[in-house]
Image: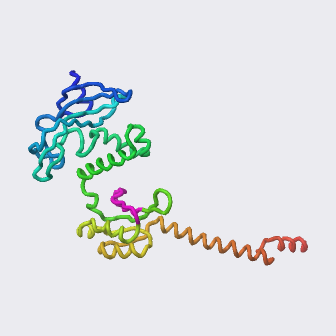
Amino acid sequence: MLTKTALKKLLKIDKIVIQKIYFEDCNGEELFIIRGRPSKREMNRCPICGKWCGRYDRTDRIKRWRSLDFGSTRVYIEAQSPRVNCPEHGVVTARVPWARHKSDFTYDFETAVTWFTLHATAQDVAEYFRIDWHTVGSIAKRVQKTLESQLPCRFDNLVKIGIDETSYKKGHKYMTVIVNHETGALIWAKKGHGKEILESFFEELTDKQRENIKLVSADGARWIKDCIEEYCPNAQRCVDPFHVVMWANEALDKVRNATVKEAQKDSASGKTVQGGKKNRKRAKRKI
């Protein structure tokens, strides 16, 4: 198998014409560079709509995209980066078949980084892939956007939803989250809490999507009740089990604290309950 063909299979790129392969020294680290260009049918295409466009300029500017490492060696794909004039999207940088628009990383690299973010902290992911900490979040957002465009709308077929608030970081910082009870999936989240935040969720839904909601679980906040009545006319509101248990425990704590205080008060005044010390003394005298 030819070296170029092997590289295409390893990088999972079949729409690239490899022109040159070489190593480059970068501050004592050896980089593996693959010089190439898109195949003829993939050249001069808009990165947004994918349509063929005329070139806007002819540039010798070379751009590099980070690919997955070969062992401990960092791998880059480099190619010319001309601009095209799209009738719909204007002047934009031409699309390449190995990376997303406005990205400095290949598809496989971004997929690997995003998968690792599900199992490790952003700091650990950044250290493992040798990238900047802030880059991890940008990569995950691009992959998320791509996946969402390929999947059905997460707001379709909503029948039973749950509304809750959760804290994050340190201090009193909250976000509102919405889950689909039938699938168990998180379908919406936004920083903050209150009526305005919840209203922004319902306003993202169409009239039909709101009418399809039949059940909403949440805590006992009045503003949640008002939002449900306004936006979900066919929905029935119920209190989620977590808050029911929490309120029951709080009620038990009040009864328990009141009982303890009453017992302490009786003890201080000399009163004892049946079976106490005084009753045991009286029983001994009778014997």
What residue lies at 44% left-to-right and 45% top-to-bottom?
A: 121
Rendered view: 168 above or below 222:
above
Q: Can you give x and y, in whole percent of width and height, for residue 49 in the image?
A: 15, 49
Does residue 161 appear left or right of residue 260 in this picture?
A: left
Does residue 111 appear left or right of residue 264 in this picture?
A: left
Q: Is residue 181 visible?
A: no
Residue 77 highlighted magenta (yes or no) = no
Rendered-image quadrant of the C terminus: bottom right
Magenta highlight: main SS = strand
What residue lies at 31% left-to-right and 50% top-to-bottom?
A: 141
What residue lies at 23% left-to-right and 70% top-to-bottom?
A: 207
Q: Is residue 233 visible?
A: yes
Q: Nearer the viewer, residue 147 or 88?
A: 88
Q: Can you give x and y, in whole percent of width and height, for residue 60 in the image?
A: 17, 35
Does residue 155 appear left or right of residue 219 in this picture?
A: left
Q: Can you give x and y, in whole percent of width and height, for residue 17 in the image?
A: 17, 30
Q: Can you give x and y, in whole percent of width and height, for residue 74 in the image?
A: 34, 31
Residue 268 occupies quadrant: bottom right
Residue 25 occupies quadrant: top left
Rendered-image quadrant of the N terminus: top left
Residue 180 highlighted magenta (yes or no) = yes
User: Furthest residue to the top?
Assistant: 1
Q: Which residues are magenta?
A: 175-192
What residue lies at 24% left-to-right and 55% top-to-bottom?
A: 152
Rendered view: 10 above or below 148:
above
Does residue 42 appear left or right of residue 103 in this picture?
A: left
